[in-house]
Image (tube, helix red, strand yellow):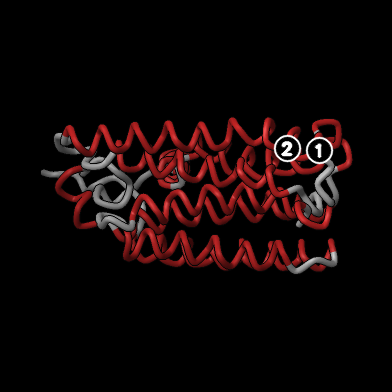
């Protein structure tokens, strides 16, 4: 006599959700806006992170987690063939519930960014939060798998850094080279890592490596350009945001 299938335990359900939101990667959602804040506000300002800053970091976490869940929701058919062990194709997590959670996390991330704007009396965090959400959804639902994919992914990283920079207030123009450079770097990584389940093409790998190098160069030159601007006594209104 066959036994009925056993239901997943609470622990296994929690583990499945942790896999779905890719918990180890959530550190990036904290590090990016925090790094942006420290770059724009000074490395000694970590003790002065305002309430709006903590709200922005929480927004980044929600948007990142929501984007990860949405990614698996959109890729369900592909994962059923290429990654059947993932929580959704293996039915460890309900598809309908995953849809609901992804939408909820993304919306809550936008709300937190708006609350951060109210707390800081500055509309920039809300604007960037909306732009970041649009970039995440655009990548997952449209751009992934197209030539626009790396551009959207790089935009997500640049916006996440920018979210922290606007919390610190105005930043000199050269410092904005850092989030731009990191965005270009992630564009290269995304292009380099295309076809993770297949075989990468040499021209694509070369292009990805080249773009990554350009991104690192742009970000690395930012401090030097900033010092040159200060040494040249360029008027602040020309370089400050």
Task: Say whether residue 9 is left or right of residue 35.
Answer: left
Asked whether, in this view, residue 49 is left or right of residue 59, the answer is right
* Closer to us: 144 or 78: 144
Residue at the left extreme, as displayed: 1
As rendered, which of 96 and 43 lies closer to the eye? 43
Instruction: Name the image quarter holding the C terminus.
Output: bottom right
Q: Is residue 195 above or below residue 217?
A: below
Q: Is 209 placed above or below 75 here?
A: above
Looking at the picture, how far across and down is residue 229, in whole percent?
75, 40
Identify the residue shown where x is 80% and y is 56%: 52
Work out which residue is located at the far front of the displayed protein and give it: 232
Q: What kind of element bears circle 2?
A: helix
Identify the residue at image location x=63%, y=37%: 31
Residue 105 appears in the picture as rendered: no
The residue at the point 45 percent across, 67 percent down is 100
Q: Can residue 204 be seen in this view?
A: yes
Numbered mark located on residue 226 in the image: 2
- In the picture, residue 34 is in which quadrant? top right
Q: Determine contact: label 1, label 2, CB under 8 Å.
A: yes
* Residue 193, image x, y percentages: 29, 37
The N terminus lies in quadrant? top left
Left or right position of 148 against 31: left
- Say which residue label 1 marks: 230
Residue farthest right in this picture: 48
Disc 1 element: helix
Residue visible at 42% across and 56% down? 152
């Amino acid at each position: 006599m066959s036994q009925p299938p056993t239901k997943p335990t609470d622990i296994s359900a929690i583990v499945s959700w942790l896999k779905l939101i890719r918990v180890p990667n959530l550190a990036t959602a904290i590090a990016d806006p925090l790094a942006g804040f420290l770059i724009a506000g000074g490395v000694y300002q970590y003790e002065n992170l305002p309430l709006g800053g903590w709200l922005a970091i929480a927004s980044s976490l929600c948007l990142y987690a929501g984007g990860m869940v949405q990614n698996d929701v959109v890729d369900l058919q592909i994962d059923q063939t290429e990654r059947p062990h993932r929580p959704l194709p293996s039915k460890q997590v309900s598809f309908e519930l995953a849809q609901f959670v992804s939408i909820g996390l993304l919306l809550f991330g936008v709300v937190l960014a708006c609350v951060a704007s109210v707390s800081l009396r500055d509309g920039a965090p809300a604007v960037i939060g909306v732009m970041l959400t649009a970039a995440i959804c655009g990548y997952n639902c449209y751009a992934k798998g197209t030539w626009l994919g790396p551009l959207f992914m790089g935009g997500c990283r640049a916006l996440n850094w920018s979210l922290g920079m606007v919390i610190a207030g105005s930043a000199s123009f050269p410092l904005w080279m850092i989030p731009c450079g990191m965005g270009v770097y992630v564009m290269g990584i995304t292009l380099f890592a295309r076809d993770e389940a297949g075989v990468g093409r040499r021209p694509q790998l070369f292009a990805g490596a080249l773009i990554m190098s350009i991104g690192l160069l742009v970000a690395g030159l930012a401090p030097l350009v900033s010092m040159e601007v200060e040494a040249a006594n360029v008027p602040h209104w020309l370089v400050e945001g």
